[in-house]
DNA sequence: CTGATTATACTCAACAAGAGCATAATGAGG
DNA sequence: CCTCATTATGCTCTTGTTGAGTATAATCAG
């Protein structure tokens, strides 16, 4: 930051004592083990690892790594920023800014002493797992309750709006299920006070829907992380952050399915992976289950450099 | 925030006096006028509107809107968060967190009294405009200098790494030019100390490359905003935030081209727009230029509700 | 009146994506 | 040892989607 240059923010920085805030770093750390996506939690599996951004931290990222490691003993590999928000419902005249991150690892070398646990993320969002078909909770509980909520609105416009949003976010028929809308769905449930977090501090209200709650807005942050990951696996080779050094294509497929919450077409999945040149054979084969032995693959590290690819959708022209 | 629930962040919040930081809100506000993408600036066109997040602000977004309106007289419509980072190079023992946003508007009803200006964004990134072919600055200045920088590395590995990154980010041949890599390109230039911001506070160094600099890291934030917008227009109908209520398809195309910095195939562009059902005819026709009169269209507001679509890339299966 | 300029309709080839069939190895269980 | 469910892997076929042009008809500038 230079001195001779104009600095519009300078008035601000000079007297920032009056604008003091504190910043919390919050981590959504994901691993996939035994075909189940899990999230790293602390405190009765109701909270995500988190802590304040301190003077000693070199950067936001390193502060986050430090906190996660201190609280769970787990070192982080890949991380990316999710979202920043200012919490409204804190008390005191001090504002808290929360900066959330998504981290991907493998559930390993964890420090046993630290008080953490890996929880299947579908414990928190049971309606998001469509690998075995549309979950019955969805049909039998969520949709009826959401419909009721939509219909209870006085105003016709509101009613129609709610119905439309419910239909869009929860559209059944499996074909149209959009697994990326994790956050929208959670927020709808929150708005309809169908999750425990929404009824806290209020009088009873309708009993909440299945799914483990978390403190504060941690479950919403988790939803944000899941949504981001489900989107990202489609255009960036991030799944490999969750895989061991060598793996079979079926293992890879199961991991993707675990994340997406839906099944994929095996043959086409292979075609996709291969044509993108993402992996190479290690030369070994393994026969873990029945069936012929499967080839083992490893991720081609080079693609990280090349294939930061971004997909075009514009009808470009030469000339 | 409840009291009976476990709160891992609580230790932090209790004694957060020691972790006090201040938060700055920074806006990249974009409009497209006369086929030129412009950014809203203050202070000699070297700074983005910004200001501290204050106690009086209801939320980060509203704080940002307040600052932009105060500094430029321009009310904001669509905004979305870009990125949050903690500045290293500030002085004092107080940390500053910067939260940046992207805003889209039309260059209109600006308060004349406020000291702001709209600047073409290619003033800051002249190498990003490929509408008239590969800019000569790129071929004649940037690439040679970057190559020199790559080759000046002692270590062979570093040299190869630099060459690879330069090739990837700046790949000429037009076909392979990836307009989304705005940030990567700026960061490479920064790393190679080819932009003014990188040589400040140091002794001379190599003279910087064409392109107007900004204070602090504002130009990097602008690059982030441009990159985000260039990516986003491909999968979400955000261009319409920049369009007047009614427009011809050619105007729409010119706007997209201005943003992407490259030309698109007219017929295919129309096919794309129409098949996605994004617009509807107003019924009027206008003949602004030569050629037959063009139909005027308006954006179909409904798609905002429906078409929050996300594109699948997984080979899903039924079953 | 001429011609450059634009709107708009179509065509075609190349390729990507969805869906399913076919064949060949295996290990589990009798 | 035999049978069969289970899996790896190769291929086909159909249907979109995308890139690239050709063709035709309105206009306005000069």
Image (tube, coloured by chain):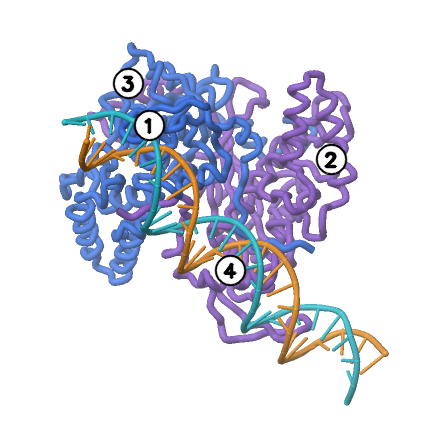
Chain colours: A purple, B blue, C orange, D cyan
Pointer 1 residue: B32
Location of residue B43 in the rendering, given as x and y in whole percent from the top left corner: 25, 21
Q: Looking at this view, is A27 or A311 the one in front?
A: A311
Q: Secondary structure at mark 2?
A: helix
- Looking at the image, do the residues carrying marks 4 and 2 touch, with CB atoms under 8 Å apart? no
Q: CA distance from mark 2 to mark 3?
A: 50 Å
The quarter of the displayed image where residue B252 is located: top left
The residue located at (69%, 55%) in the rendering is B319
Q: x%, y% of residue A157?
A: 64, 19
Label 1 – label 2 distance at C-alpha = 43 Å
Query: Upstream in the sequence, badge 4 or badge 2?
Result: 2
Q: Position of residue A102 (x, y in %)?
A: 52, 44
Q: Would you say residue B87 is visible in this rendering? A: no
Q: Is residue A123 visible?
A: yes
Residue beneath disc 2: A143
Left or right of A282 on screen, residue A2: left
Which residue is drawn at the image coordinates 25% and 30% (left, top)? B214
SS at circle 3: strand
Circle 2 marks a residue in which chain? A
Question: Which is more toward the observer, B125 or C7?
Answer: C7
Closest to the observer, B262 or B138: B262
First along the sequence among labels 3 and 1: 1
Nearest the viewer among C15 and C1 is C1
A189 over A89 or under it: above or below: below
Q: Secondary structure at mark 1?
A: strand
Q: Nearer the viewer, mark 2 or mark 3?
A: 2
Q: Position of residue B241 (x, y in %)?
A: 42, 27
Q: In front: mark 3 or mark 1?
A: 1
Q: Chain of mark 3?
A: B
Cα–Cα gap, marks 4 and 2: 34 Å
Name the residue that disc number 4 marks.
A272
Q: Which residue is mark 3?
A: B116
């Amino acid at each position: 930051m230079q001195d001779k240059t104009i600095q519009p923010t300078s008035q601000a920085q000079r007297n920032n004592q009056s604008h003091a805030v504190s910043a919390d770093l919050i981590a959504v750390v994901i691993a996939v083990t035994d075909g189940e996506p899990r999230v790293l939690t602390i405190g009765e599996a109701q909270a995500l690892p988190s802590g304040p951004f301190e003077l000693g931290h070199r950067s936001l990222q390193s502060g986050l790594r430090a906190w996660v490691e201190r609280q769970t003993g787990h070192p982080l590999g890949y991380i990316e920023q999710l979202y920043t928000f200012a919490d409204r419902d804190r008390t005191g005249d001090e504002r808290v800014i929360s900066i959330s991150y998504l981290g991907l690892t493998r559930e390993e070398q964890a420090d046993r002493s630290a008080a953490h646990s890996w929880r299947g993320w579908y414990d928190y969002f049971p309606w998001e797992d469509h690998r075995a078909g549309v979950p019955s909770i969805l049909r039998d509980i969520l949709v009826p309750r959401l419909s009721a909520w939509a219909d209870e609105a006085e105003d016709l416009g509101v009613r129609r709006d709610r119905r439309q949003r419910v239909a869009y976010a929860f559209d059944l028929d499996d074909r149209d299920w959009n697994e990326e809308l994790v956050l929208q769905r959670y927020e709808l449930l929150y708005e309809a006070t169908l999750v425990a977090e929404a009824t806290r501090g209020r009088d009873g209200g309708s009993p909440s829907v299945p799914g483990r709650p978390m403190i504060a807005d941690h479950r919403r942050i988790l939803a944000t992380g899941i949504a981001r990951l489900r989107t990202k696996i489609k255009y960036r080779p991030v799944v490999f952050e969750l895989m061991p050094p060598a793996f079979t294509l079926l293992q890879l497929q199961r991991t993707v399915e675990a994340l997406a919450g839906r099944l994929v077409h095996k043959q086409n999945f292979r075609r996709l992976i291969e044509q993108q040149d993402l992996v190479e054979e290690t030369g070994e084969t393994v026969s873990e289950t029945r069936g012929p032995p499967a080839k083992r693959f490893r991720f081609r590290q080079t693609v990280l450099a090349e294939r930061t690819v971004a997909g075009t959708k514009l009808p470009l022209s030469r000339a």
